[in-house]
Amino acid sequence: MPKMKTHSGAKKRFHKSSTGKLLRTKGMKSHLRRKKSKRNKRLFASKIGLSDAIGKKIKRLI
């Protein structure tokens, strides 16, 4: 049986941390940035963990 291919959309959007958790970037950080506060833009830069329910599906894609 051939190997499963990596889903290229998931490959670009999610990555694993050193502990094995899946991380995603926050949206809304590239468009209309002049209106947003500095604090808000700084919070968009951080990564956020995925829930376990969605994580299983994403792990299969990656």
Image (spheres, rainbow, N blue to C red):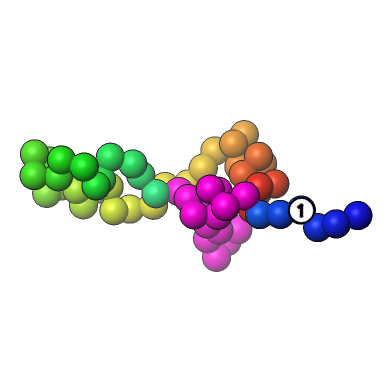
> In the image, 21: left or right of 6?
left
Q: Position of residue 20 (x, y in %)?
A: 60, 58
Q: Position of residue 38 (x, y in %)?
A: 11, 49
**Quadrant in which residue 55 is drawn:** top right
The amino acid beneath tag 1 is Met
What range is drawn magenta here?
7-24
Q: Which residue is depicted at the point 33% across and 53% down?
A: 46
Secondary structure under badge 1? loop
Given residues 23 and 32, the one toward you in this image is 32
Q: Position of residue 36 (x, y in %)?
A: 12, 41
Q: Would you say residue 40 is visible in this rendering?
A: no
Q: Which residue is depicted at the point 62% across and 34% down?
A: 53
Q: Which residue is mark 1?
A: 4
Q: Which residue is depicted at the point 54% across and 38% down?
A: 51
Q: Residue furthest bottom?
A: 18
Given residues 5 and 38, the one toward you in this image is 5
Height in image: 38 above or below 20?
A: above
